[in-house]
Image: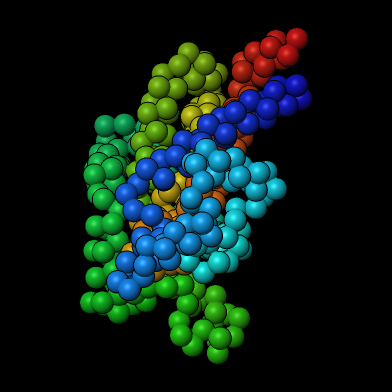
Amino acid sequence: MVKYIVKRIFGLIPTLIGITLISFFVIHLAPGKPTDVQTSMNPKVSYEAKQRLEKLYGLDKPIHIQYVEWVKRFVKFDFGRSYLDNRPVSEKIAERIPITIFINFSAILLTLGLGIPLGITSAVKRGKLPDKLTTIFVFIGFSTPEFWLALLLMNLFCINLGWLPVSGIASLDFESFNIIGKILDMARHLILPVAISTFGSLAMISRYMRTEMVGIMTQDYIRTARAKGLDENAVIYKHALKNALLPIITILGLSLPGLIGGSVIFESIFAIPGMGRLFYESVMARDYPVIMGVLSIGAILTLLGNFLADLAYSYADPRIRVVTEEVEA
């Protein structure tokens, strides 16, 4: 297993290089330069001033030279400095990433806590009322755009009813609250973002769970367990559920890059200062160092998610574990 892990880690390096290479060239193909964005509001800026800005940022060099210089900084965990405020990119990311991680991990926990029981109930009650209601919910979840749902819930709970704050993660008088008051205030601000982040994933997880459980409940070993007189709950939760959870491991591994990509919509709508909003703002401003910093972290999370999913899969499924050991031998 150790040889397999080391081999996989070294195999991820070329993939990471390829992702950063493609990302670097693609963002430079977008129309407009950082200097154009910074000088567009001032018609008196001369061509020579723009040239000096490009030289300051290193944009006057060939693109492959720019990429090599970026890689040299990247291996030292240095993403450079932002074109907008000259702050270190790593510092800006460190400020934004905690709230994004909190929202998304809360959504993942809610998704698993609700989606797995829903899928099991739907499979066990196949064709009955619970299954039909779950199916309707799944279709609604798959077909509802997140941005539209966010605006709808914001209008209902924040504007019409006034139960929740419209945007941000804290009130203006946040510092005057005690510890419990601060927790409650942040909770009120994050209820809708977490709910929006959970909604679509919940529909997907419950559907996957139902599909797996329906297939497994017809297997021979399930019939054998029932023939031996095992309690139905033991059959479902001890024998069927363990095998049905294997595809969920893969889905969870693929959900790690969604910490950034899936946050762009609701963080922009609810004005949450997280990674998704930072990425959106940097793209609009052509802030290349910040864009590459966020994309690099997204690439690392994607590869890490796939790697952890493979490891978890090998431990959960003995057949894959045997194949891994044979490869090492």
Q: Is residue 25 above or below residue 181?
A: above
Locate the N terminus by quadrant. top right
Is residue 144 visible in the rendered image? The answer is yes
Where in the figure is residue 144, as x and y percent of width and height? 25, 49
Describe residue 137's horizontal placement relative to residue 179 as left or right. Answer: left
Is the residue 99 above or below the residue 180 in the image?
above
Q: Is residue 313 left or right of residue 165?
A: right
Q: From the viewer's side, name the closer residue of 8 and 62.
A: 62
User: In which quadrant of the rendered image does the C terminus lie?
Assistant: top right
Please name the residue shown 49% across and 42% down the image.
62
Q: Nearer the viewer, residue 306 or 179?
A: 306
The colour scheme applied to this rendered structure is rainbow
Instruction: Give residue 155's position: percent from left, percent from top.
Output: 24, 70
- The answer to whether residue 302 is visible is no
Across and down, in percent, residue 207 comes to 36, 36
Which quadrant of the view contains residue 45?
A: bottom left
Q: Would you identify the image quadrant in which residue 11 lies? A: top right
Whole-percent x, y for residue 290 in the image:
51, 56
In front of the other: 62 or 315? 62
Near-viewer residue (203 or 4): 4
Residue visible at 73% across and 26% down in the picture: 6
